[in-house]
Image: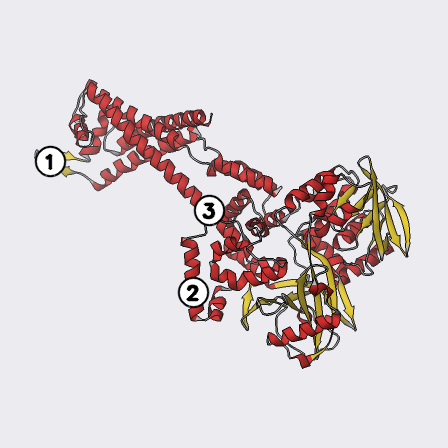
């Protein structure tokens, strides 16, 4: 009995981990979405600065994300839009990583 | 049910427990005992009003049904006693289980430094080979601690060098825990309040229950109850033959009062040593089974009980004697087990335990010489003067310990396979199963064997030390199932190449698509994106650059993915290693108590 259980334990160590694509996607989506949401709001709270030509600018570098995420702005509303973009991108990337990983691991396991 | 005729061979804890369970269910049985006294290895010897235990049997269990039975039979006669046991080495006492500070102080500064150094050396440069008991312990505690606290006593108990005892044996003695159990326990330990758990464990170690007049009281009382309920217990009845045919035991031959009788039965429970039991089968068992049974070995011991003319000798319940100068292995102080064992409060009774083999010099030594040896050794140890010893007696206990040698597992398996074909014959108890069952686990196997006769279907061989560990964990079956399902998902190895390719591919595609997007749409961010060529030589925001970026993205992603998987696997492996080590150490804590 004990010997059988030990070999089960060894089997556990020799086994390969498979990822749950939905969970990985959801996790990465939430992380990326929250990073953009918090990052944007942090800049909004911190406030911006006046440019030499008299414009008031908040987070000019993060604003560049709007090149990819159409409609995104460094503002509270923008942070919500950014969250959805980040969530979507993270979910796609996470799921893709999980899916490719599982295919390779399955292939290598034979 | 009443048509069943149950015959139980052996009136030790296992045999009597089986009869008791059956009797409670209204089924009578016949119990046969070779000796003139019941209790088997847990008997109590009476000598001139003194009672003494053979080996020292703490009534200490985590099996609820066994605890209930003890209380049911003994009631108020079960005393709660404080435990104090120490190792006696080099004329000094060391607490056992070992307390690090006490051990270091007792060893002296210089010795302590050497012990610490030896421990560090063992941690940094462990012996690569772990084939022997010596290597196994030294790798965990250092060579010096091994020599002081494990070598001499283990060699006294088993009569062979620690270099000849397999490491596997040590691993089994620390409960042979499977990796899965260790991990489950680690997870549960994190959940429970560790302070509460430690407190419970400490209480379990520091106190134990003990019958007022020794363990024999329990078995004697059980015999009385059995007889009141209609069961029969025959003493001095030796089973000389077991008749079997067609996967059933038909009858047994019993030698009583100089006559051989034949007793037929419907079901048989047997707790006598497995080797002798197999030898008694008529017709003989297949040759390979007989050879396997003959390969099972035992270690015996004898107790020299000495009555001392002093009210107090030492405060311990028992002492482990690690001094290589004397032959005695353990000294029981019966008065500290229960004051009722000693009729005169101004006297003390010590039991000097010598481990030996039936037929060797020590075993065959006349009683008066053994008593003299005991007196001499007590004086040499500085515990009692010879002149303080009033008198003594000797009790020999054959087959006290089944030996776990290099071949026993294979032999036991062969015997078990044969026994599995006998539908109405069950082996129980320590010697019946050739297993280091303590009294409680012997009783548990007997309870389950009785339940099997009443219609249950328990596998008695699965009652082992792991069960005890599960009891400590106090998990519900649902939790165990959930952990069984979850653990592989958590601790399995991550495929490093798989994750490297997956992360690499995603990173490559992201960089490719974002570059392509900028090529099509243009915009201010292109200036910043171009800066990537500071790291990715040749990268530009162009179609060609998109492909170059994809290659770079893949390479870096590949590297990061591989590194992540490697570190994750490494940390999991380290965690598992730590859990196994911790469990080994925790279960090794009472290593000496198990002989």
Between tags 3 and 2, which lies in front? 2
Under tag 1, what secondary structure? loop
Between tags 3 and 1, which lies in front? 3
Mark identifier at residue B458:
none
Q: Nearer the viewer, residue B519 or B146?
A: B146
Q: Looking at the image, can residue B171 be seen?
A: yes
Under tag 2, what secondary structure? helix
Q: How is the image coloured?
A: secondary structure
Residue furthest to the front? B361
Q: Which residue is mark 1?
A: A51
Q: Which residue is mark 3?
A: B577
> From what the image shows, is residue B164 above or below residue B527?
below
| Distance between mark 1 and mark 2 Cα atoms | 71 Å
Instruction: Check the residue under mark 1 and report the chain it is in.
Output: A
Q: Which residue is mark 2?
A: B114
Q: Quadrant of the C terminus of chain B?
A: bottom right
> Residue at position x 72%, y 67% from top?
B365
């Amino acid at each position: 009995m004990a010997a059988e259980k030990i070999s089960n334990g060894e089997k556990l160590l020799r086994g390969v981990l498979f990822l749950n694509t939905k969970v990985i996607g959801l996790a990465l989506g939430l992380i990326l979405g929250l990073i953009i949401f918090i990052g944007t709001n942090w800049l909004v709270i911190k406030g911006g600065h006046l440019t030499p030509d008299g414009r008031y600018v908040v987070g000019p570098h993060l604003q560049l994300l709007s090149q990819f995420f159409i409609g995104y702005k460094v503002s509270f509303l923008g942070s919500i839009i950014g969250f959805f973009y980040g969530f979507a991108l993270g979910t796609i990337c996470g799921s893709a990583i999980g899916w490719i990983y599982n295919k390779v691991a399955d292939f290598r396991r034979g | 049910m009443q048509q069943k005729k149950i015959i139980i061979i052996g009136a030790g804890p296992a045999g009597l427990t089986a009869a008791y369970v059956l009797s409670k269910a209204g089924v009578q049985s016949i119990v046969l005992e070779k000796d003139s006294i019941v209790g088997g290895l847990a008997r109590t010897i009476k000598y001139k009003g003194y009672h003494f235990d053979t080996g020292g049997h703490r009534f200490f269990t985590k099996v609820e049904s066994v605890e209930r039975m003890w209380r049911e039979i003994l009631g108020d006669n079960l005393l709660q006693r404080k435990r104090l046991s120490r190792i006696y080495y080099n004329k000094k006492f060391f607490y056992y289980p070992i307390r690090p500070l006490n051990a270091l102080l007792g060893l002296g500064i210089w010795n302590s430094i050497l012990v610490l150094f030896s421990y560090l050396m063992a941690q940094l440069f462990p012996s690569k080979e772990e084939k022997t008991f010596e290597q196994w312990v030294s790798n965990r505690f250092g060579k010096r601690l091994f020599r002081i606290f494990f070598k001499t006593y283990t060699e006294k108990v088993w009569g062979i060098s620690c270099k000849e005892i397999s490491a596997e044996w040590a691993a089994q003695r620390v409960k042979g825990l499977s990796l899965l159990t260790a991990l489950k326990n680690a997870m549960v330990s994190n959940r429970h309040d560790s302070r509460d758990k430690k407190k419970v464990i400490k209480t379990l170690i520091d106190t134990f229950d003990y019958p007022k007049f020794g363990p024999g009281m329990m078995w004697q009382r059980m015999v009385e109850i059995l007889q009141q309920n209609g069961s029969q217990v025959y003493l001095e009845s030796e089973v000389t033959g077991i008749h079997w045919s067609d996967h059933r035991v038909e009858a047994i031959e019993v030698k009583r009062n100089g006559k051989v009788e034949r007793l037929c039965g419907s079901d048989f429970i047997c707790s006598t040593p497995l080797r002798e039991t197999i030898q008694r089968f008529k017709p003989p068992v297949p040759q390979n089974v007989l050879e396997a049974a003959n390969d099972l070995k035992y270690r015996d011991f004898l107790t020299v009980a000495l009555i001392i003319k002093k009210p107090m000798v030492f405060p311990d319940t028992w002492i482990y004697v690690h001094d290589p100068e004397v032959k005695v292995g353990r000294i029981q102080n019966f008065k500290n087990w229960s004051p009722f064992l000693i009729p005169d409060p101004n006297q003390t009774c010590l039991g000097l335990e010598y481990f030996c083999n039936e037929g060797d010099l020590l075993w065959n030594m006349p009683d008066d010489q053994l008593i003299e040896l005991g007196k001499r050794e007590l004086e040499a140890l500085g515990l009692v003067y010879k002149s303080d010893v009033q008198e003594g007696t000797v009790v020999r206990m054959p087959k006290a310990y089944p030996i776990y040698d290099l071949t026993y597992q294979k032999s036991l398996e062969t015997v078990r396979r044969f026994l599995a074909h006998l539908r109405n014959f069950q082996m129980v108890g320590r010697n019946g199963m050739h297993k280091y069952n303590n009294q409680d686990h012997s009783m548990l196997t007997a309870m389950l064997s009785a339940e099997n006769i009443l219609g249950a279907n328990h596998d008695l061989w699965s009652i082992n030390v792991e069960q005890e560990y599960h009891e400590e964990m106090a998990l519900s079956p649902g939790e165990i199932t959930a952990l069984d399902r979850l653990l592989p998902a958590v601790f399995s190895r991550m495929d490093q190449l798989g994750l490297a390719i997956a992360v690499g591919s995603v990173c490559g595609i992201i960089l490719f698509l974002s570059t392509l997007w900028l090529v099509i749409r243009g915009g201010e961010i292109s200036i910043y994106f171009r800066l990537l060529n500071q790291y990715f030589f040749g990268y530009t925001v162009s179609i060609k650059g998109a492909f170059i970026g994809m290659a770079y993205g893949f390479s870096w992603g590949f590297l990061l993915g591989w590194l992540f998987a490697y570190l994750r696997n490494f940390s999991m492996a380290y965690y598992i290693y730590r859990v196994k080590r911790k469990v080994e150490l925790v279960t090794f804590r009472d290593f000496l108590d198990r002989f």
